[in-house]
Image: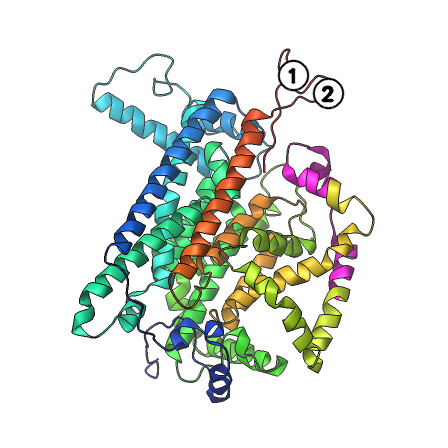
């Protein structure tokens, strides 16, 4: 591999000459960050960075206090196992008693959460014994004691407390790598104080953004219950962060742990291996790659050439890729062996979790992402451009054909591949039940009427990444997104968490003054906080009972039911 010449990682691959000329004609806010001209940053008041830092610190403290307060409130009002906890908590308590041969066949995920819970209990019990702390006989830490409901839920609360730190590390690495910061730093001697002030403001804004992202309602809710999602999402995001830093062995270990929480995380292992291969491709051939942001694609044949070049060079450099990616490949082979011997990816209750071809899951995901990305992805500004973009596309034959063909293809996939899972229709505790009942089942044509909304959502979301991520990155993400969602027969918002968060941490920054990004972050924070407030109010304060009893009657043996994601 003597011909290989390493180059510094780039935020986006360089384009060939015709594409560079096309880029010059694009508006500044549509150009990749690494190809925008550097601007002298506006003067800031010296204290502005400190004020923003104080705001970020206050938001972080409020986040931690809110999470801990909700954990206490949930334990007070919902002291026993609820919903899927009726499976997870008894299984974890059996592991806490070292009953490792016990297994509930209704559980469909691996034993990762239960092993972590048992290890946490053992560590706490050992620490109490070492420090000679008296332990009550009925305590979870007493010999032979099982983990209490509160203790088990507290583990997910800890994952929730650690999430902002992990999100902050991802945002820093993606949007403020050292070379990027240095290339934009002012060079005049008099600007040293300004650079420090701006660095403080930027760090504080990233910290505030990390809190806003951590409040993402679907993931935030499950930090207060004993579900697999908190640990699963935390470790897969940790694996992605390590992957971006080219810590392949550590990333693989984090992937391994995440797969023990949810086996479908193997799909995101493939995503990390694929994006790492793309980075190696860009670093090895920085001057000859055809890869470019999708906004610079000239034709379908251009896309075909990009894919062909990447495939050919992967084959040509296969020994080198194996040497770099062997930890990912080893774990992926282990996952394939498991699927073969298990006769599927589901571990238990296979009759209710049969994989299918649920193509509309992709449409639901983009609608979901457009809603929660209203502020961070600038969806509102994209929607204002939609009519003009549609009008301009009518003048080009290729765009006109795509616009005409898309609704036909989507209608046919909706007709053929929509799946109404029995769980979706029989459980009125989930929000998806009411969405399906009141929207999709309102009329036979309701699911087709939503096609324009799906099209606009897909366009508005992908438009934000069309200038900052390469074609190959989009291809890898799209393939893994389809592999993660399409086989699932059940519409479940929890399945959207990982792909949404991956897109969210890569959300491009608006050009111009920093207050544009500040507005987006504050808007996202307030929106997520409002949604969380509504969801927890419904969950905690508006319980109901099944049957003919009054919704406010909690007497008798009928347990209270609660609304949730």
Name the residue at 36% across, 43% down.
59
Determine the main secondary structure of the stretch shown in magenta: helix
Which of the 4 quarters of the picture holds residue 304? bottom right
Residue 359 among those drawn in magenta: no
From the viewer's perspective, is 323 left or right of 564? left
Q: Is residue 550 visible?
A: yes
* Vertical order, 106 against 207 (above or below): above
**Residue under numbered circle 2:** 547
Give me the C-alpha separation between circle 2 and circle 1: 9 Å
**Residue under numbered circle 1:** 558
Name the residue at 38% across, 18% down.
144
Between 332 and 123, the one lying in front of the other is: 123
The quadrant the N terminus occupies is bottom left
* Vertical order, 133 against 117 (above or below): above
Whichever of callouts 2 and 1 sits on the residue coming sooner in the sequence is 2
The quadrant the C terminus occupies is top right
Residue 534: give x, y in percent of width and height: 55, 36
Residue 427 among those drawn in magenta: yes
**What number is the disc on residue 548?**
none
Residue extending furthest left? 189
Between 394 and 346, the one lying in front of the other is: 394
Between 215 and 271, the one lying in front of the other is: 215
Q: Is residue 332 visible?
A: no
Q: Which residues are magenta?
A: 409-437
* Vertical order, 431 against 194 (above or below): above
Residue extending furthest right? 444
Total labels drawn? 2
How dense is the environment of label 2, judged by Cα within 10 Å: few (below 14), some, or many (20 and up)?
A: few
Residue 36: give x, y in percent of width and height: 40, 76
Contact (Cβ within 8 Å) of mark 2 with mark 1: yes
How dense is the environment of label 1, judged by Cα within 10 Å: few (below 14), some, or many (20 and up)?
A: few
């Amino acid at each position: 591999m003597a011909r290989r010449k390493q180059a510094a990682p780039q935020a986006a691959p360089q384009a060939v000459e015709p594409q560079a000329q096309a880029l010059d004609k694009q508006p500044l806010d549509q150009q990749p960050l690494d190809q925008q001209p550097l601007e002298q940053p506006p003067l800031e008041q010296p204290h502005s960075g400190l004020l923003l830092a104080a705001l970020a610190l206050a938001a972080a403290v409020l986040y931690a206090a809110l999470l801990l307060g909700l954990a206490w409130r949930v334990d007070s009002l919902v002291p026993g196992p609820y919903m899927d906890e009726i499976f997870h908590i008894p299984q974890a308590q059996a592991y806490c008693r070292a009953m490792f041969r016990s297994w509930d066949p209704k559980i469909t995920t691996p034993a990762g959460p239960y092993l972590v819970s048992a290890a946490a209990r053992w560590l706490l019990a050992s620490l109490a014994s070492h420090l000679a702390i008296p332990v009550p006989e009925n305590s979870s830490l007493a010999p032979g004691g099982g983990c209490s409901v509160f203790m088990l839920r507290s583990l997910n609360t800890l994952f929730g407390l650690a999430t902002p730190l992990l999100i902050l590390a991802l945002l820093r690495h993606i949007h403020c790598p050292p070379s990027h910061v240095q290339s934009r730093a002012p060079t005049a001697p008099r600007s040293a104080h300004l650079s420090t002030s701006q660095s403080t403001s930027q760090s504080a804004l990233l910290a505030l953004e990390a809190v806003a992202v951590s409040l993402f309602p679907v993931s935030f809710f499950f930090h207060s219950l004993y579900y697999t999602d908190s640990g699963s999402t935390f470790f897969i995001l940790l694996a992605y962060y390590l992957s971006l830093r080219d810590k392949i062995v550590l990333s693989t270990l984090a992937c391994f742990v995440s797969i023990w929480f949810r086996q479908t995380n193997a799909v995101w292992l493939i995503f990390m291996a694929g994006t790492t291969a793309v980075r190696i491709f860009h670093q090895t051939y920085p001057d000859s790659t055809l890869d470019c942001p999708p906004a610079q694609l000239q034709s379908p044949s251009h896309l075909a050439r990009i894919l062909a070049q990447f495939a050919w060079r992967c084959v040509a450099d296969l020994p080198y890729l194996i040497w770099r990616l062997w930890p990912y490949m080893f774990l992926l082979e282990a996952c394939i062996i498991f699927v073969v011997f298990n006769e599927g990816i589901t571990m238990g209750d296979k009759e209710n979790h049969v994989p299918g071809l649920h193509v509309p899951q992709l449409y639901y995901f983009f609608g979901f992402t457009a809603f929660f990305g209203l502020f961070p992805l600038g969806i509102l500004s994209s929607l204002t451009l939609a009519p003009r973009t549609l009008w301009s596309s009518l003048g080009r034959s290729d765009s006109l054909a795509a616009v005409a063909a898309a609704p036909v293809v989507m209608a046919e996939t909706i007709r053929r591949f929509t799946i109404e899972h029995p769980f979706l229709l029989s459980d009125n505790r989930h929000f998806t039940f009411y969405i399906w009942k009141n929207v999709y089942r309102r009329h036979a044509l309701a699911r087709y009427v939503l096609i324009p909304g799906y099209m606009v959502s897909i366009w508005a979301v992908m438009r934000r990444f069309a200038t900052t991520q390469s074609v190959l990155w989009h291809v890898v993400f799209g393939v893994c997104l389809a592999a993660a969602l399409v086989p699932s027969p059940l519409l479940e918002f929890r399945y959207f968490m990982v792909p949404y968060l991956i897109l969210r941490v890569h959300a491009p920054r608006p050009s111009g003054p920093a207050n544009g990004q500040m507005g987006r972050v504050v808007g996202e924070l307030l929106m997520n906080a409002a949604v969380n407030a509504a969801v927890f109010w419904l969950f905690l304060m508006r319980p109901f009972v099944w049957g003919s009893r009054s919704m406010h009657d909690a007497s008798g043996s009928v347990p209270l039911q609660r609304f949730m994601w």
